[in-house]
Image (cartoon, rainbow, N blue to C red):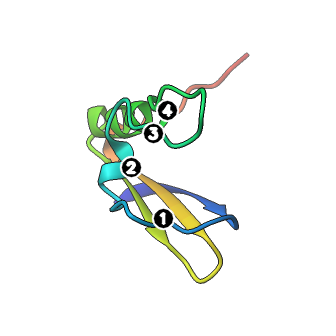
Amino acid sequence: SYFIIEVFNDGEQLTGVTGEEIFQPFRKGNKGQFGLGLAIVKRIAELHGGKAAAFNTNNGVAFQIKILMNDMQIRDKK
């Protein structure tokens, strides 16, 4: 089973780019940004046996991160 994190953006939908392409490093979306954030998110998810995805919704874009529960370690912070 997976631990799933979903983030919804009610802004513009993905146009002219696939959900996979948006995770490519150095893909510039906004001026002045390097395009590394989503690439890093995807890589971290993959390192934990999971994956990251982005897709259009009726109201914007959804970003989803799935991580295998077996790979998660819950630590008690004291």
With 49 as the anchor, is 44 left or right in this view? right
Contact (Cβ within 8 Å) of mark 3 with mark 2:
yes
To which residue does mark 3 refer?
38
* Up/down of 46 relative to 34, above or below: below
C-alpha gap between disc 2 and disc 1: 9 Å
Contact (Cβ within 8 Å) of mark 3 with mark 4:
yes
Judged by depth in the image, the label closer to the viewer, 1 or 3, is 1
Look at the image and tell me whether residue 68 can be seen: no
The disc labelled 2 sits on which kind of residue? Ile
In front here: 49 or 78? 49
Residue 36 at x, y percent in the picture: 44, 29
Q: Earlier in the sequence, mark 1 or mark 3?
A: 1
Look at the image and tell me whether residue 74 can be seen: yes
C-alpha gap between disc 1 and disc 4: 16 Å
Contact (Cβ within 8 Å) of mark 2 with mark 1:
yes
> Circle 4 — which element?
helix
Label for residue 22?
A: 2
The disc labelled 4 sits on which kind of residue? Gly
With 44 as the anchor, is 61 left or right in this view? right
C-alpha gap between disc 4 and disc 2: 10 Å
C-alpha gap between disc 1 and disc 3: 14 Å
Q: Residue furthest right?
A: 78
Residue 20 at x, y percent in the picture: 30, 55
To which residue does mark 4 refer?
37
The disc labelled 3 sits on which kind of residue? Leu
To which residue does mark 1 refer?
14
Name the quarter where the N terminus is drawn: bottom left
Q: Earlier in the sequence, mark 1 or mark 4?
A: 1
Q: Residue at x 68, y 64 (%)?
A: 11
